[in-house]
Image (spheres, rainbow, N blue to C red):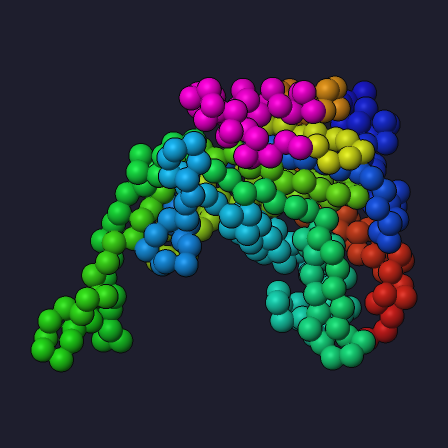
């Protein structure tokens, strides 16, 4: 019996979507531990468009990546991936522009949560089943960022000038980038999910390779490595901050070792690591590239939404 089958037998993960009542919280919590390493330059902006988001921890300014920066990119990826398969994502579905609640009957709306802004009975929302963690750099901000010069262009393609022919003050500016080779630990927690929904979440994580502000000169810039998945009947207090706090205290940058240590302490034997995680990720990748299997999984999810929430969706 595989490790994931043992987890299912213990009741810590539903084998399929049919075993879940979408209307109730069944007390299933799954925590995915990820190490995300920059493979190219990454822009994580705050309210100041040229500055990297950061906060002071343990006497140094550290890079901070809000949860929304991870979540938004991964939702966009899995949505575009499933659009490749006919009949899964409604053709009329547009994120943040849904006005018919029946358009929410799709796997991404169920996993990430969604809402319809339609009038009267068409206005509704679905709660998210995944929760993203913030991330913090081990290294101080100056060690892992650099500034590159940009220029603002006019409609004619030339650098902006003032009336006297001088370069405008805001035409030349420095944007702060996170350098390649920087590692961030983060967690995604799933609540009340089945094996199919866990696989969809993993596809979103391993498939996404581009994060942060979009520019014409930046492409893929992050590689994700899933190193552990914990299963429990209540959420465990393991987070990117607890990991980094321990490492800052020890002045050690062995992120993977600390993640495994804290996950083992919190989850004991109810944990996928090493060979077990690699085996499950191999299964996930097979599903990811097999359109027929993926389509069947998504159809079962939509059927379950229709069945459990018949009164919720009604007729449009």
For the point 88% across and 42% down, which residue is it? 19
x, y percent for residue 20: 86, 45
Relative vertical location of residue 288 with respect to residue 268 in this rendering, above or below:
below
The residue drawn where x is 37% and y is 49% is 52
In this view, the residue in front, 129 or 272, is 129
Q: Which residue appears at 41% of the width and 59% of the height?
A: 47
The vertical placement of 246 against 174, above or below, is: above
- In the picture, residue 234 is in which quadrant? top right
Chief SS of the magenta region: helix
**Position in image of residue 41 (x %, y %):** 35, 44
Magenta extent: 237-266
Residue at x 87%, y 70% (from the top left corner): 314
- Name the quarter where the C terminus is drawn: bottom right
Q: Can residue 81 be seen in this view?
A: no
Question: Relative to the observer, which residue lies in front, 189 or 8?
Answer: 189
Which quarter of the picture shows residue 8?
A: top right
Instruction: Give the quadrant of the N terminus.
Output: top right
- From what the image shows, is residue 136 above or below residue 311? above
């Amino acid at each position: 019996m595989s490790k994931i089958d043992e987890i299912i037998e213990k009741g810590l993960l539903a084998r399929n979507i049919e075993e879940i009542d979408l209307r109730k919280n069944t007390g299933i919590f799954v925590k995915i531990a990820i190490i995300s390493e920059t493979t190219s330059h990454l822009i994580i902006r705050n309210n100041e468009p040229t500055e990297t988001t950061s906060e002071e921890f343990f006497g140094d300014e550290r890079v901070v990546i809000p949860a929304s920066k991870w979540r938004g990119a991964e939702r966009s990826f899995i949505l575009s991936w499933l659009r490749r398969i006919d009949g899964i994502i409604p053709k009329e579905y547009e994120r943040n522009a849904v006005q018919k609640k029946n358009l929410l009957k799709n796997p991404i709306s169920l996993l990430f949560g969604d809402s319809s802004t339609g009038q009267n009975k068409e206005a509704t929302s679905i709660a998210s089943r995944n929760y993203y963690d913030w991330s913090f750099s081990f290294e101080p901000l100056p060690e892992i960022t650099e500034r590159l010069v940009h220029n603002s262009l006019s409609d004619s393609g030339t650098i902006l000038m003032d009336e006297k022919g001088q370069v405008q003050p805001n035409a030349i500016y420095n944007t702060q980038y996170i350098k390649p080779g920087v590692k961030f630990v983060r967690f995604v927690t799933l609540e009340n999910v089945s094996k199919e929904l866990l696989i969809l979440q993993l596809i979103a994580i391993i498939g996404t390779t581009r994060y942060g502000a979009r520019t014409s000169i930046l492409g893929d810039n992050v590689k994700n490595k899933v190193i552990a998945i914990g299963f429990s009947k209540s959420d465990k207090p393991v987070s990117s901050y607890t990991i980094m706090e321990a490492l800052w205290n020890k002045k050690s940058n062995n992120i993977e070792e600390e993640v495994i240590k804290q996950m083992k302490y919190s989850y004991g034997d109810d944990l996928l690591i090493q060979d077990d995680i690699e085996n499950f990720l191999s299964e996930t990748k097979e599903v990811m590239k097999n359109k027929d299997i993926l389509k069947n999984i998504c159809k079962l999810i939509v059927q379950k939404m229709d069945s459990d929430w018949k009164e919720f969706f009604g007729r449009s």
